[in-house]
Image: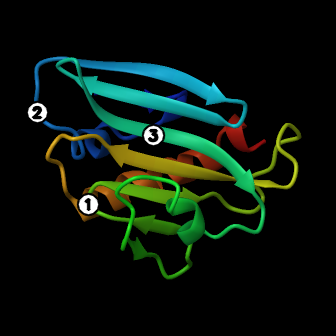
Amino acid sequence: MPTSLCGIPVNPALVKAVLPGGDSLASATVKPNGGTVRCNLSVDGKDALSIAQAWWSQGQTTATVSQGYSHTDDGTLSEDERFVHTGRAGVGRTVSSCEVSEHPEQDLYIVVETRDTGVDDPEAIEKLLVAYTKAVEGSPACR
């Protein structure tokens, strides 16, 4: 199990909880555009998990941003409205102090998405989403 994803430290147990069983694990970092960094994990050669850091215009809500991602419909919204998650995916907004000069007037969101692996565990998704979001907040991605 990886101890970091896209250079962000992560508890391996939280990652393992949202992955299917298998013999081999591979990870790849993808930057599909100027505002997104995505870590893709595959188990036995099949896509299993994607975790992304994506910049969105300020003023959006987590509920609005989550509509842009699969499997977040009818998700549970946290009391502070920073996180929304289902058993297969989740979106979290970093704290407002997370600012970098390359992305003025934008907020950084974290997106956790399982692929077609049979994993459906809202508690595990929430734990990974919240922990990874907090780790990003303390990383160079937010400075």
Residue type, label 2: Gly
Q: Earlier in the sequence, mark 1 or mark 2?
A: 2
Q: Earlier in the sequence, mark 3 or mark 1?
A: 3
Vertically, is 101 above or below 97? above
Residue type, label 1: Gly
- The percent position of residue 76, horizontal first and vertical second, equals 38, 75
Residue type, label 3: Ile
Determine the CA span between mark 1 and mark 2. Answer: 17 Å
The tag on residue 51 is: 3
Residue at figure coordinates x 45%, y 67% from the top left: 84
- The percent position of residue 12, horizontal first and vertical second, equals 31, 36
- The percent position of residue 111, horizontal first and vertical second, equals 49, 49
Picture quarter with the N terminus: top left
Left or right of 122? Residue 127 is right
Camera-side residue of 138 and 34: 34
Q: Earlier in the sequence, mark 2 or mark 3?
A: 2
- The percent position of residue 65, horizontal first and vertical second, equals 58, 61
The residue identified by callout 1 is: 87
Left or right of 121? Residue 101 is right
Picture quarter with the C terminus: top right
Q: Secondary structure at mark 1?
A: loop
The residue identified by callout 2 is: 21
Camera-side residue of 107 and 124: 107
Q: Residue furthest bottom?
A: 79
Which picture quadrant has residue 101? Answer: top right
Determine the CA span between mark 3 and mark 1. Answer: 15 Å
Q: Secondary structure at mark 3?
A: strand
Q: Residues within 10 Å of mark 1 (few under 14, many from 20)?
A: many
The tag on residue 101 is: none
